[in-house]
Image: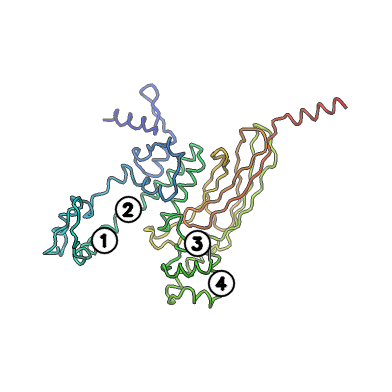
Amino acid sequence: MVESTLQDLESSKCIAIKEDVDTSPLNLGLIASYYYISYTTIDIPFGSAQHVPKAEDQIPGALRNHQQRERVQRHSDPAQGRRYPQEARRPPSSYEIPDPLQRPSSQGAPSHPRASLALQAYPELSKDTDEILLKAARITQACVDVLSNQGWLKPVITAMEVSQMLTQAMYSSDYVLKQLPHCTTEILERCKEKKLETVWDLLDLEDEERLELLQMDKSKIAELAQFCNNYPSIEMNHKADEEVKLGDVATVILEMVRENDDNGFAPPVVAPLYPMKRKQEAWWIVIGDPAEDEILAIKRVTVNSTQKFEMHFKPAKAGRHEYKLYAICDSYLGVDQEFEVSVRVDDGSRSRKRRHEKEEY
């Protein structure tokens, strides 16, 4: 049993076995241990991850693994659904659950028994959703670590967007103001008519105009104001080496200044549908080469009031390179930042040419 388990861990690239005696952890194993996920979950076919669909299409993939198959079936599944009425505390006496594999009748099923079953199933389903959501968030962060270890830029950014979507219960393609509490479809339509594209656009309105637009009672306005107060307001400055020699390390100095800190600390994330009561906001800082779809450097930071740090990378080729600096939040949509980083890499030919011209002179 021990031998077969070790073989499974080795085939999943979680450990290395030397001379059938010594074992040592590999990156996948360390990541699986840190995020407390199964080795069968971490063993993902990352060879196909470079062909990345939209971020919202990645959510089923985050759940379609052994870790999520541990969930028990519920009444919505064919086998379970047919006997759930008998297990309910108040089973509908004159209602038979239809077979989902059969074509429904023209009359359809009565709605009140379905509503009764849904209400009775709500506590179990809600608990399942919370467990799966927290597990999916953990798996997503593990995916970021694994994909960044592979050096793939686009897949990593996609996984980061999935983290935002799971936290705020919306798709990255949705209207960004949808993450505001109590914003109904009607309110969002009025915001679109006003051509509001960001949370800042809403805050820039005059008080009377904003109240007329939202049409909420005081308690809902207070919750929306709390979201806006905690919504990240961060100014990012950076300075990069403009020229380095081939083989040397380039340095980027960064400073992130939070304008909405809470007594020197980052305010907690406001996400009404997220099961964790207090979630801490974090940021991924990525330096990448979009032309090569390559990550050059990556760092995860928490910005309380002011955060200063450096990032280093070694350019692989000579010439002028246009890199990108990304600051991506793990909890909110619409706050990510992106900057150009231009670096000239000298292979020594220019200095040799100048010396040659000087000797001729």
Label 2 vs label 3, nearer the camera: 2
Give x and y (percent) for residue 239. Answer: 66, 48
Q: Which comes before the other along the chain, label 2 or label 1? A: 1
Q: Which comes before the other along the chain, label 3 or label 4? A: 4
Q: What is the C-alpha distance between the residues marked 2 and 4?
A: 39 Å
Q: Which residue is denoted by mark 4 in the rendering?
A: 205
Kindly indicate whether the residue at mark 1 contacts the one at mark 3 (C-beta within 8 angstroms): no
Identify which amino acid the numbered label 2 is placed on: Glu
Residue found 23% across the figure and 60% down from its top: 121
Label 3 vs label 1, nearer the camera: 1
Q: Quadrant of the N terminus?
A: top left
Disc number for residue 267: 3
Q: Which residue is denoted by mark 2 in the rendering?
A: 131
Near-viewer residue (234 or 168): 168
Q: Which residue is denoted by mark 1 in the rendering?
A: 123
Identify which amino acid the numbered label 3 is placed on: Pro
